[in-house]
Structures are given as structure tokens and as C-alpha cells.
Amino acid sequence: MIRELSAVMCVGVLAGCSSAPLGPSGGSRDAVVDVFMTTDDGRLARWVLEDDGTMHFAGGHAARNGDWQWTGAGDPTEVDKIKRVVQAWGDRPIPGDGTNHVVWHVRVGDDAVQQIHGVSAPIQTMWLALDTAGRERLRDVFDRVPEGDLTKYMREREAAAQVEE
């Protein structure tokens, strides 16, 4: 009996130590919203928007730990849009369609983390605004990409035409 009870307790402890998504944790106290996304194919991403418009982004395992891969100022128009979306939620639970292909962990201000399963129109609206507001994080990548041959050709052609005039 004691051996069986010990085995059950051991299984219970091990089940509690599973590697479930951590969700937003350790975020700034100035955060307007902290959103952590996981998908059934293993993708992870996290956005935090602070009250002053500062944004943080991390993808992959860095997202789980809050190891920011980019921090910067968000586009003011999109930041305002995000704040309006968050304010519209109020204290109500955020709806999801209940599927498990994507799980959102959302913390608004100092509130508890809400876990939303599946497609959620309010979350998608906010996620798109976060992504748009934080496009600056991709500028270095785009600056390193060489111009396409057709674009380069057209610019050279336009320059040559202006010289001939």
C-alpha cells in the first residue's frame, strides 16, 4: 500500500514538472500587454508593450524566457491602436474558438494571465497591430538583403535615361 501510494505521489510530482508553456512572466510592471503565443507545431513568439510605447519581441525559446531579441519604440499609431484594443477588453475574458493549434497567454497590466485556445478575433487584431508597430525590428534584415536584379536594372535604366536628357 505504501509502495503504491509512493508511486502515485511520484507520478503526480513528475506530471507537475512537465514542460508546459510558461506564458508571460517576469514582464515589466509598466506593461500594457504581454502576449505569449505557442502553436502545435512548436512555434513560440512573445510581444510586450509598455505604457511608454517601448516594445519587446522574442521568438523561439527566447520567447519562453523573456530573453528579448529586439527592444525599441513602436509605431505610435499602432501603439495607440493596441492600447484601445486592450482597453476595450476591460475585465472580460478574451474569447477563443477552443481549438488547440494555437494557445495565447495574455497578461493585461498586472492582471492574471488568461489562456486563450485557438482563433480569437481580438487577439488577432492586437497581434497584427503589435507586429506592425514593431516592424522596425526587421530593418537590419531588410537592409542586408541585396536588391533584386530587376529592381537594380530599372534604377540603372532610369538613371541612364536622365543622363541622356
Image (cartoon, rainbow, N blue to C red):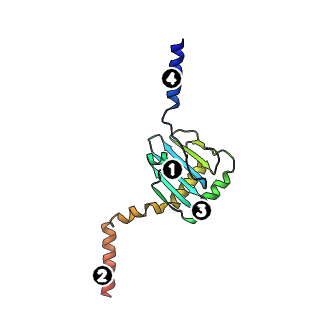
Q: Amino acid at mark 2?
A: Ala
Q: Which residue is mark 1?
A: 46
Q: Kindly tell me whether residue 119 is visible in this rendering.
A: no
Q: Amino acid at mark 4?
A: Cys
Q: Amino acid at mark 3?
A: Asp
* 3 and 4 marks in contact (CB < 8 Å): no
Side (left or right) of 88 relative to 140: right
Mark closer to the observer (4, 1): 4
* 4 and 1 marks in contact (CB < 8 Å): no
Q: Which residue is mark 4?
A: 10
Q: Which mark is residue 52?
A: 3
Task: Please state the horizontal and vertical placement of residue 160, each as a whole percent of the image.
Answer: 30, 81
Among the two numbered marks 3 and 2 on one chain, the one whose residue lies closer to the N terminus: 3
Mark closer to the observer (3, 2): 3
Q: Kindly tell me whether residue 20 is visible in this rendering.
A: yes
Q: Amino acid at mark 1?
A: Arg
- Mark 3 and mark 2: Cα distance apart in space: 48 Å
Q: Residue furthest right?
A: 91
Q: Which residue is mark 2?
A: 160
Local crowd size for mark 4, using a 10 Å CA cut-off: few (<14), some (14–19), many (≥20): few
Task: Please state the horizontal and vertical placement of residue 76, each as a whole percent of the image.
Answer: 57, 65
Give the mark count: 4
- Mark 2 and mark 4: Cα distance apart in space: 77 Å
- Mark 2 and mark 1: Cα distance apart in space: 47 Å
Mark closer to the observer (2, 4): 4
Mark closer to the observer (2, 1): 1
